[in-house]
Amino acid sequence: MTNGGSFEAIADFWDEQVGEEGDDFHRLLVRPALLRVLGDVSGLDVLDLGCANGATSRALADLGARVTGVDVSARLIELARQREAARPRGVRYLVGDAAHLPDLADASFDRITASMVLMDIEDAEGTIREVARLLRPGGRFVATLFHPCFQIPEGSSWLIEQDVTDEQWISVRVWRYREPFAASTIAKSGQPAPTMNYHRPLSWYALQLTANGLLIDALDEAYPDDAFAERFPDATVRRLSVIPAILVLGARKG
């Protein structure tokens, strides 16, 4: 099971916030890191897991991929289909549980993405098994997620410290890292209902990927560039330049 459809309750709010191309945080920080690790997708069959309203799916289609987007929220898929109808890109959108996708055939995708979704899925272990089943030999899985070492729900906080010379230092205090746990969170200001977030240590992801024959071939941490700096406060840019908030995992099926 995934998170039980908690995004269903905020689907319209989420679509409003994310829009056609994604909000600034996703569009300027998360997606460039995802695409950099993913590489050329032109002419490839790509599955976008946890596609929400389809912002990443549309970006992949614009790069020439044949895209299937899947999300557990029926309302988000409805909104994605509405956007597809308004501007067709050939994206196929399906309602489905990322951990159990029986309508999709074995070895039917060259690439699978999961952008900012693994930490929202209760059965991430089952999802990674499905990824391994659905990938073709040599295919790749690329996921972005809040950095499990530094961005822990109810388990970490940003600190600004000063030394004896009055110089400021940015750090993160972490008090819950090793053990997986779930926490109810509000991801965006004004969000009408909380969603669930599932923390797992970095080693958990490495073990699950390798156990399913997915060999990690990329590990990246999104870095704020000039375009990001133009849209976000200096304090945010400085924090993310010192300590990464977004992890990118890439793995290849043997």
Image (cartoon, helix red, strand yellow):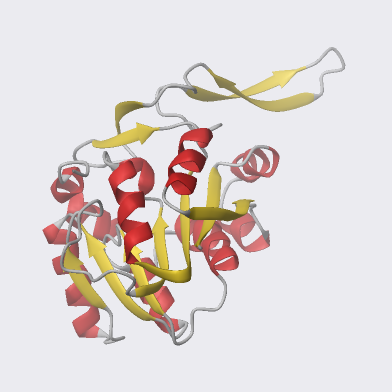
- Given residues 197 and 98, the one toward you in this image is 98
In the rendered image, is residue 188 in sight?
Answer: no
Image height check: is 218 above or below 195? Answer: below
Point out residue 47 in the picture as x, y percentages from the top left corner.
Answer: 34, 69
Left or right for 82, reference 90: left
Quadrant location of the N terminus in the rendered image: top left
Give the residue at x 38% y 58%: 132
Left or right for 7, reference 160: left
Give the residue at x 46% y 48%: 209
Point out residue 177 in the picture as x, y percentages from the top left corner.
Answer: 49, 23
Give the residue at x 36% y 73%: 109
- Given residues 217 and 186, the one toward you in this image is 217
Point out residue 68 in the picture as x, y percentages from the top left corner.
Answer: 29, 74
Res 17 quadrant in image: bottom left
Image height check: is 196 above or below 56? Answer: above
In the rendered image, is residue 174 in sight?
Answer: yes
Give the residue at x 16% y 68%: 103
